[in-house]
Image (cartoon, grey):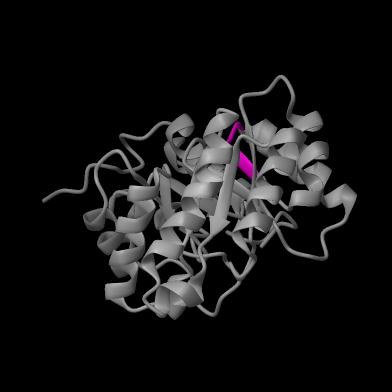
Amino acid sequence: MTNPFSIENLTERDIAKAIDHSLLRPELDDDFIEAGCRLAAEYDVASVCVRPVDVRRAAAILAGTDVKVGTVIGFPHGSSTTATKVFEAHQALDDGATELDMVIDIGALRSGRDLDVQDDIAAVVEAAHGAGAIVKVIFENHYLTDEEIVRACHLTEAAGAEFVKTSTGFAATGATHADLALMRRSVADHVQVKAAGGVRTLDALIDVMNLGTTRVGATATKAIIDDFRARRAGQLPTVAAGSSAETGY
């Protein structure tokens, strides 16, 4: 079957609104965060995903734009208590976040404590939905079997979150085609799939879109969209993926 998405039938907005521009590396300074937020606004991406400490600043920079502010909860290991994750969620929401990417309790999932995992997710979902925000649940698939990924999908859906997400971008591996296809098969149509880690080119982004992914955590945002513009115009790409100083994982 022919893939439904290609450079020819996608618009620049389709590409941009599939991207959460990631600004999560621990060493990023204020100037880098500001530049990253302004880049996100210039390219009109779906959101920025910033560290919790940067949410208020990002919200101020992006006020009046169509770019949402996201942040991470229980990041990157997922081993905070549920109460801590809920506190983080409320703080982020108060600071202006409208999208929360939370990490599951990986150890609890691997130990078979499924109810604890679901309750952990549901508590953050309740906080987010109370403020009109959405939740993306990070599994960190590098550490999980296929059976554990499927269980995590079912628990996320039962807890009411909007997205399942492959990874933090900080483990040894990120999004794989096999995992994305498995996750898409394992949740209902209303639950979306986000890829994170390793999607650094336009072709890679289109590939994962054709697996049912609707969001991608990206650091090579400028390179991806510049490549799209050049190729739609019949030119060679002018920016090599990942070559600019935009990378934020």
Q: What secondary structure is the stretch in magenta mostly built from?
A: loop
Q: Residue at x 68, y 57 (%)?
A: 84
Q: Where does the image place residue 204, in percent across and percent down from the top left?
A: 41, 58
Is residue 115 something that shows in the picture?
Answer: yes
Q: Nearer the viewer, residue 175 or 234?
A: 175
Which span is picked out in magenta?
44-48
User: Does the magenta run of residues contain 45?
Assistant: yes
Q: Nearer the viewer, residue 136 or 231?
A: 136
Direction right: furthest residue: 30
Is residue 229 something that shows in the picture?
Answer: no
Quadrant for the C terminus in the image: bottom right
User: Does the magenta run of residues contain 157?
Assistant: no
Q: Residue at x 80, y 37 (%)?
A: 56
Direction left: furthest residue: 1
The picture quadrant where one finds residue 241 is bottom right
Q: Residue at x 57, y 38 (%)?
A: 128
Q: Nearer the viewer, residue 175 or 54?
A: 54
Q: Nearer the viewer, residue 14 or 69?
A: 69
Q: Where does the image place residue 121, in percent across and percent down from the top left?
A: 48, 53
Q: Where does the image place residue 117, in percent across and percent down from the top left?
A: 44, 63
Direction top: furthest residue: 64
Is residue 74 left or right of 120 when viewed as pictured? right
Q: Where does the image place residue 178, in percent across and percent down from the top left?
A: 29, 69
How many numbered badges does the structure rendering display?
0
Is residue 240 left or right of 149 when viewed as pictured? right
Vertical side of 84 occupied by 130: above or below: above
Q: Residue at x 36, y 76 (%)?
A: 112
